[in-house]
Image: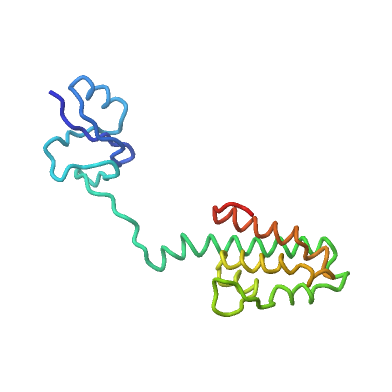
Amino acid sequence: MARKYALINNNVVTKVEDMEEDAYRDAAKLNQLVIDINDMLPQPTVGYTLNGNALVPATAPVIDATYIKNNKVKPIKAFTDDLIATIIAENIVMGISQAGKSGAVLDMAVRKVTVASTPNPVSLIETFMNLTLTVSIEVLDYHIDHIEDYADLAPFVTTERLTQTKNNIQLFLGVPTT
C-alpha cells in the first residue's frame, strides 16, 4: 500500500510523493532523508524545513531595515557608484579636463528637469544619489530628447553615451532596453 513521503535534501523538503515500499528504499538511497508523512497534520509540503526532528513550514525572511539595506539598497548603491565611476573615467580618458568641459558636464548632470513620475523637477545626479533608477531612465530620456542643448559637450555627452547609460540601468533592473 502506497504511503506519502517527504524527500529531504539540505534539510528542505524538495518533493512529496506517494510511494510503495520498494520505491521508498530507492528514494532513501538518493536523498538526504525520506520521511513518512502520511499521518502528519498539517501535511508538510515542498519548502518545509527539517528543524531538529520536526518538519516546519518555511518562514519568509523578515523584511526589516537591515534586510532592505543588505538586499536592496547596497546592490543598487554599488551599481550606481560603479556607473558614475565608469562615466567619470571614460570622460577623463577622452580628455574632459583638457577640453575644459568638466564644469559644463557637471551642470548638465545637476540640471533639474521635469519628468512624469515626480511632482518636482529632478536632476540625474539626484536620481543616482536617491537610488531611484526608474526616474534616472526618465531623466536620461529627457536629456536624449534635448541633446541639441548639449551639442557643445560632445564627445562627453552624446545620444549614444546617454542611451548606453540608460541601457545599463535597464539591464540592471531587468527590464527591456530601449
- Give percent across and percent down for residue 167: 65, 55
**In the picture, which quadrant includes the N terminus?**
top left
Q: Which residue lies most toward the right here? A: 98
Residue depicted at 35% across the width and 57% down the height: 61
Residue depicted at 78% across the width and 72% down the height: 149
Closest to the observer: 31 or 175? 175
Quarter of image, res 62: bottom left
Residue depicted at 79% across the width and 75% down the height: 104
In this picture, residue 100 sits left or right of residue 87:
right
- Give percent across and percent down for residue 169: 61, 58
Q: Is residue 159 above or below residue 149?
A: above
Closest to the observer: 51 or 83? 83
In this picture, residue 93 sits left or right of residue 136:
right
Q: Is residue 144 above or below residue 9?
A: below
The figure's colour scheme reads rainbow
**In the picture, which quadrant includes the C terminus?**
bottom right
Residue depicted at 21% across the width and 42% down the height: 44
Q: Is residue 41 above or below residue 59?
A: above
Q: Which residue lies most toward the bottom here? A: 120
Q: Is residue 170 above or below residue 73?
A: above
- Give percent across and percent down for residue 105: 77, 72
Q: How many marks?
A: 0
Quarter of image, res 82: bottom right
